[in-house]
Image (cartoon, rainbow, N blue to C red):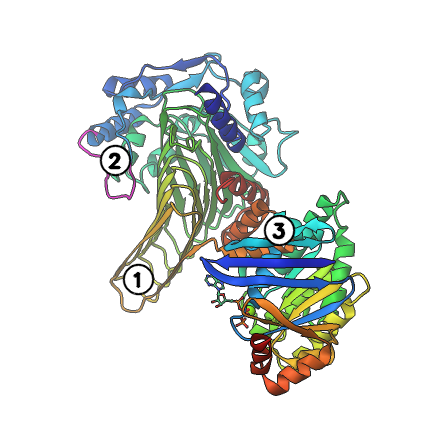
Amino acid sequence: MLNIDNLHATAADTKILKGLNLSIGTGEVHAIMGPNGSGKSTLAHVLAGRDGYEVTDGSVTFLDSELLDMLPEERAWHGIFLGFQYPIEIPGVNNTYLLKAALNARQKFHGEPEIDAAQFLRVIKDKARLMQMEQSFLNRSVNEGFSGGEKKRNEIFQMAVLEPRLAILDETDSGLDIDALKIVAAGINALRSEDRSFLIVTHYQRLLDYIEPDVVHVLAGGQIIKSGDKSLALELEARGYDWVLEETSSA
Amino acid sequence: MPAKNSEVKKLVDKKYRHGFVTDIGSDTIPPGLNEDVIRLISRKKDEPQFMLDWRLKAYRHWVTLREPDWAKLDIDPIDYQDISYYSAPMQNDDGPKSLDEVDPKLLETYEKLGIPLHERAALAGVAVDAVFDSVSVTTTFRDKLADAGVIFCPFSDAVKDYPELVEKYLGSVVPYRDNFFAALNSAVFSDGSFVYIPKGVRCPMELSTYFRINEAKTGQFERTLIIADEGSHVSYLEGCTAPMRDENQLHAAVVELVILKEAEIKYSTVQNWYPGDEEGRGGIYNFVTKRADCRGTNSKVSWTQVEAGSAITWKYPSCVLRGENSVGEFYSVAVTNNMQQADTGTKMLHIGANSRSTIVSKGISAGHAQQSYRGLVKIFPTAHNTRNHTQCDSLLMGKHSGAHTFPYMEIKNPTAIVEHEATTSKIADDQLFYCRQRGLSEEDAVNMIVNGFCKEVFRELPMEFAVEAQALLNVSLEGAVG
Ligand SMILES: Nc1ncnc2c1ncn2[C@@H]1O[C@H](COP(=O)(O)OP(=O)(O)OP(=O)(O)O)[C@@H](O)[C@H]1O
Ligand SMILES: [Mg+2]
């Protein structure tokens, strides 16, 4: 589904990604762990098409298209979803309204009719229940005045409504209390399917107790330096990153 | 460079949808201003002596004044002798008696602007006074309103039909001595709307005036007077458009609202005069004096404005809160793009005890536009236990636009509670990216964010206007990002 080949990216002339390779198959769940500042959010942003990064080398294909040639909204229409590490507040813009506009833009791109209003409301209600969100959240302004945990839950709610092909979740588990973590994990698990893939950035193996990843990667110094199964996450939790870094530098 | 020019023109055409000219014969007096011109205007309108006397007093005062220069506006000098002060579309000597006698070209013009004047086709529940250059073309639903005792007619009719009301209230809120542009307007004003709502009457329809400038080299100087007698209620809307021309045109209006005890006026404006092109050529100079006088206990006025057009806007709708418990509100969205400039805000003058006021101002600046909010909250010694809340937000788009805030406060009574909040934000790249990541195009994302920013003001507008205002904002900001 996603194929990243030798990706180099800079921001403000600082080299951040330095030859990153990663391949995610359809229906797979990959977790990325790594020290602060190693480039995890940068990777997520570059994949989603955020301004301010320059790709200096490498390529990314997504479902047989050149991802890097597309505008951010085109990537969304093709099925990319980014759950933000720091979700943005948009005063005065109704949460539901944003989602409806987003869905309809995608429908239009694919030459399909607008979503029927009644059907849309049903979907919204269902997904809100899944995320155990109060109805009132739906009609509030996007993320405005939401607590940190509520914002994260809202990201997963949006993902559930938009039903992407590839969900990139950047530290969705950070700042969640234990109950919220379970809800978010249940939300993600409910969306796991044969034709949907996940790239989950996290610092804690705790999340992976609930969401079993197929592959765990370590991103450090702008590269994937180690990959393994979920036992790698347990090992990282116990031993930290130093041993992996040493292993690679001596190799 | 003809190719490039036509490209630019196409672009501007697309943005300003009301830029066409109606080709119609007109009775336009030659440019220039002196006492004879004023006499001529008054004679053309067949006015009683008191009107002519008042005009002449205003004119004699005006010649002693100089244009105000305190606003943060950069204006090319205006040659007041190069403007024609009266232009009327040709019609029979007495003017049309009914819609059937109105020139079809005029009806077509309003049709094109989305304001059908035939009552059958008209928006249900909205009566319209259509002012074309210096005269009122027609006023719809006059009979139906008359049944409720409501007077809604062109100002020039009111001068003849209700001289005692006009003489009593004209200039009682905005005297001709008020300022340079008010004095000029008082001397040369040609038409506008007149409204009287009798005691205890709730006006059965929305009233609206649609101002259209058509003729080149003319100014439009309209005057609106609304009197809400005790315990009455009215909602009034005003809209404005003009053709696209390379030269600037002057518009200097005066609006006076008289609100007696327990009465309420809700006054909404969607101002969309031609703003000029991208390089700042042409556009309307809009100098407006609007004031409401809340004269009695529990009088209430609410101004809502969406200012999207004009090359220059100079406008401060104000509230004189004389009555005890009187209430003044000002909700404003001002959008400036390209080379537009706006200096706008309000004055809240608290004289009566327990009077309350609210100011919500939203300014959006894009391109090279400059915008200022200028507001005065004045609490007189008599005004015990008054309250004001001011919220003033600016949104900047792009790197070259500017927003400025000039809040003035004069508080002469220690029991007053006056609060002021101000924010300036850039349309954040974060917000745009967030919306686009979800699947909105850049343009839709901008529109959504801007409309969200203006929501508190839009929800004060009557339904039909809110939709129009939103669409207008989107068109005005087309191409502002990216
Ligand atoms: N726009 C930018 N300009 C300059 N430096 C940047 C920019 N964006 C990111 N960086 C730098 O690139 C490095 C990687 O940042 P990134 O946010 O991708 O890290 P991360 O792995 O997500 O870290 P964390 O675990 O703390 O979220 C950091 O050193 C950061 O300061
Ligand atoms: Mg990060």
Q: Position of residue A239 (x, y in %)?
A: 60, 86
Distance Cα–Cα, label 1 vs label 2: 29 Å
On whether ligand 1 comes within 8 Å of the CB at mark 1, the answer is no
User: Which secondary structure lies at badge 2?
Assistant: helix
Query: What is the secondary structure assignment of the residue under circle 3?
Result: helix
Say which residue label 2 marks. B180
* Picture coordinates of residue A235, whole percent (x, y): 66, 84
In front: B410, or B343?
B343
Q: Which numbered disc covers residue B445? A: none
Q: Which mark is residue A68?
A: 3
Q: Point out the residue furthest to the right here.
A: A194
Identified by mark 1, the residue type is Ala
Are callouts 1 and 3 both on one chain?
no
State which chain disc 3 sits on: A
Q: Do the residues marked 1 and 2 share a common chain?
A: yes
Residues at marks 2 and 3, common chain? Answer: no
Q: What type is the residue that disc 2 sits on?
A: Phe
At 71% from the left and 60% from the top, the residue drawn is A166
The residue that appears at 62% across and 29% down in the rendered structure is: B119
Q: Which residue is mark 1?
A: B383
